Image: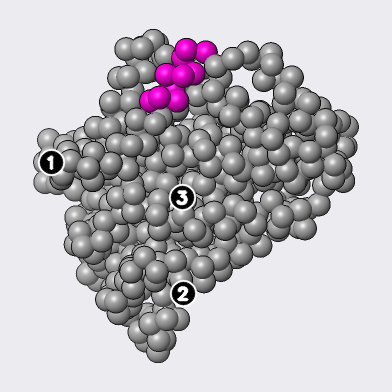
Amino acid sequence: MYERLRAMFLYFNSVVPFRLKPAIITTLVLFALLMVPTPDGLTPKAWGLVAIFLTTIVAIILKVMPIGVMAMMAIVIIALSQVTSTSSKGAVADALASFSNPLIWLIVVAILISRGLKKTGLGSRIGLVFISLLGRRTTGIGYGLAVCELVLAPFTPSNTARGGGIVHPIMKSIATAFGSDPANGTERKIGTYLALVNIHANTITSGMFVTATAPNPLVVDYVARVTNGSFHLSWTTWALCMLLPGLACLLLMPLAIGLLSPPEVKATPGAVDYAREELKRMGPLSGKEKVMIGTFVLLLVLWANVPAMLLGPAFTLDPTAVAFVGLFTLIITGTIDWDDVLSEKSAWDTLVWFGALVMMAEQLNKVGVIGWFSNGLKNGIIAAGMGWEAAAALLVLLFVFSHYLFASTTAHVSAMMLAFLTVGVQLVPPEYHVPFLLMMTAGSTIMMTLTHYATGTSPIIFGSGYVTLGNWWRVGFLMCVGELAIFAVLGGIWWKLLGYW
């Protein structure tokens, strides 16, 4: 009997389109949660929604199937179980409601725009230009990669596309040119250092602009909700608040990694020659690259709300509308074509999984789960007798370091951030709300440094073999602590000068 069961398991494990063991664990989690008595303060349907949401998060962490499939499964279960409505029609409407959310479409359209960086070669050219200027030493190459990330960040909301698809190939080419190859055991010559700079520059720049990574617009929405719209992180406000502490982190990061994981090769004059040869091979700027640059300038001007500053509030444009303008510009100029739009899998994948997670977060708030959890967390902190300063610090640290349990920044933000923000604004005095909210905002991207599965960029860079698991986690933890300290101290001073507290 045992052998037959084992043979059946091995057969299904080889043919089904999901990982069988994680799928079984996830299913058991769902049934276990459903068997738990409904907690006081929640309705049975609300607890059913909690069970579906937590099971989806577990499935994403265990990588049962691609995240888009798991998100679609959650949509199906919510629609069939009717945990958000009294009718099937209402449940389906709730399950699909978030797909009309402008924030989701902002991310999708911006990912489509960023495809032009790859297709035209402009992304690689930008990276090579900075290497040619700064690459005479290994640290200089690190700064070149960091500046490349900074230049691309406002226009590439897929940090995975930016760090993994544009900057990482440049980093690998340079490492290989210097004979640094994991296959030969020479990764520490220069590759380990550059790979760590690659990921940490990606996480820092992801927090500097609303449009630098997918979950940021969701953070904007949550901040507006908990303050009843009194504090809104516009594109300009976000960029200004994160400017000084973000630049400080970016400036210190290559030096810090040089101390934590020093490269064996310090001087790299050949990198400049390599970059110049590659730029020579690419030739002068093409017409399509010029259109990309012009489109980026247009997007930056409109996202920064310059027309409204010059001509009045009637000329204020919604960020999503601006993104569509940029996409349309690229299409009608032939910089990208409709086939490029249709074939950009990451954009449509993001639409599905991001939309599902946003939907569940909204429904959890709607049925009172977020308020219930927030009150429980608040009462626990009050019972511990903490002052508001310690409570605020605890909330930030709990939120950031709980990312060890998540393989998706968006899933983490969707699952926990609104509740933590709600508790924070209840415990922190009103005059200190903004610095607390900004620390939570910064923490939502700083936490991506922690693990090799923390964000989509991480497994790409880790998978190249340049950084060991232990080194990744050690450097990630220390950099996370350091960046939180910079934002708490320098950021706090900067926000004070800006008049936010």
Pair 2/3: label in front: 3
Residue 295 visible? The answer is yes
Above or below: residue 92 compared with residue 240: above
Residue 460 percent coordinates (x, y): 62, 35
User: x, y (%) of residue 340?
Assistant: 42, 15
Circle 1 — which element?
helix
In the image, residue 216 lies in the stretch drawn in magenta: no
Q: Is residue 49 left or right of residue 366?
A: right
The part of the image, by quadrant, that contains residue 106 is top left
- Amino acid type assigned to the residue bearing label 3 in the image: Met
Which quarter of the rendered picture does the N terminus lie within?
top right
The residue positioned 76% from the left and 57% from the top of the image is 260
Q: Mark 2 and mark 3: span between their CA atoms?
A: 21 Å
Q: Earlier in the sequence, mark 1 or mark 2?
A: 1
- Residue beneath label 1, please? 314
Name the residue located 33 percent from the left edge and 23 percent from the top edge. 327
Res 208 label: 3
**Number of residues whose C-alpha sits closer than 10 Å to that of mark 3, classed few (under 14), some (14–19) or many (20 or more):** many
Say if residue 181 shows up in the picture: no
Q: Work out how far the residue at label 1 is from the one at label 2, CA to CA, in angstroms.
A: 40 Å
Give left or right: position of 332 versus 494: left
Magenta residues, start to end: 286-295
Return the residue at label 2.
Answer: 393
Q: How is the image coloured?
A: one colour
Q: Nearer the viewer, residue 303 or 88?
A: 303
Decide which of tag 3 and tag 1 comes sooner along the chain.
3
Residue 465 percent location from the top left of the image? 75, 37
